[in-house]
Image: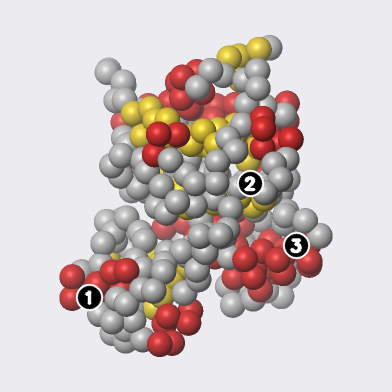
Amino acid sequence: MAVSKAASRGFDIIGDIHGCACTLERLLEQMGYRKINGIYQHRRRQALFIGDIIDRGPRIREALHLVRDMVEHGSARIVMGNHEYNALGYCTRARPGSGRKWLREHNPRHDRLIRETLDQFAHHPHEWNEFLEWFYTIPLFIEETHFRAVHACWDRNLIEKFKQIQGGNRIDEDFLHASSAIESFAGQVMDNLLRGTDLRLPEGLTITGRDGYVRHFFRTKFWAESPQTYADVVFQPDPLPEAIAQRPLTADERKQLLSYPASEPPVFVGHYWMKGTPAPLKPNVACIDYSAVKYGKLVAYRMDDETVLSRDKFVQVSVERPEGLGRRQTEDSLTR
């Protein structure tokens, strides 16, 4: 396979930050990035952020400035996370005749998820509006010769159709409005790529997550090979109850699942609140979200020209609880 010039530069693919700006600085410095004129840069490599810079954490505004400065200077790239997408919907008024006031409903759950972000920008409204405009410039996915990056799921069919319709890898305001209808093509693109694929639980069954939210669906792997049971495809922080996990997949359910063949380039995702020691999910699939804002780890993968991912290429920084700081000042400051 030919290797592009971008490939030889080297990329450091960084997981979900969620306002953990101090930890991000430590990770960048550990990987050899240094501040030059106030912007983190590496003499040879480029960072690539997997999305979800905002919400939950204590230093969201600082994290956004750090990341945007790097992207605009060319020392980093970024793909959109579901939290950036959610913020656009939450802060965008619906069009007349839609029957709603906002694209993303202002209900207690949605209010809670974005509260930390809006609180931290309360005295900087112009900055927040500028960041909302900047979110439109963030691509949904990045596809290099030798690797791919997307926040939650590489759905080849949706991505190819999206490129044909949009002429690239970014959304615009019309696409944002269209995506508020989940059953639409735009809605499916944003749900699959930024939140992942799912299966509906059998009739009458639900699962209650640790956040108290009752779900009728569970998130699934987009790379499962020959799965037989729900346990073979579930991919989410909250495990399925054993009785549900061992249920055989029906033929129709298997048809709904995606696959990511071993012949495809390595793909990187975030989103899924992983725990434990960072390692590839498959030789060509890696999740780099290791729950930083929940006092986990902020993780990066140092991608060069390899076609098979290695656990030795992960870099991690544990999120510390600073002494003497209150809950809203610590590096997780979870919104519950």
Tell me residue 14's x, y (percent): 51, 36
Residue that appears at 51% across and 33% down:
302
> What residue type is disc 3 on?
Lys
Q: Which residue type does callout 2 highlight?
A: His
Disc 3 versus disc 2: nearer the observer: 2
Q: Is disc 3 in contact with disc 2, using a CB cutoff of under 8 Å?
A: no
Q: What kind of element bears circle 3? A: helix
Q: Which mark is residue 146?
A: 2
- Within the image, what quadrant is residue 201 found in? bottom left
Marked residue nearer the N-terminal end (2 or 1): 2
- On residue 246, the disc is 1
Q: Is residue 184 above or below residue 154?
A: below
What residue sits right under mark 3 in the picture?
163
Specify whether 132 is left or right of 18: right
**Residue ID at (55%, 33%):** 12
Q: Quadrant of residue 278?
A: top left
User: How far apart in space, not on screen, are marks 2 and 1 (Cα)?
Assistant: 37 Å
Residue at 18% in and 70% down: 242
- Residue at the spot 50% in from the left edge and 18% down from the top edge: 29
Left or right of 35: which side holds 221?
left
Left or right of 57 in this view: 174: right
Give coordinates of residue 55: x percent, y percent: 48, 42
Q: Determine the CA span between mark 3 and mark 2.
A: 19 Å
Which element type, helix, strand or loop, lies under badge 1?
A: loop
* Rendered image quadrant of residue 181: bottom right
Colour mode? secondary structure
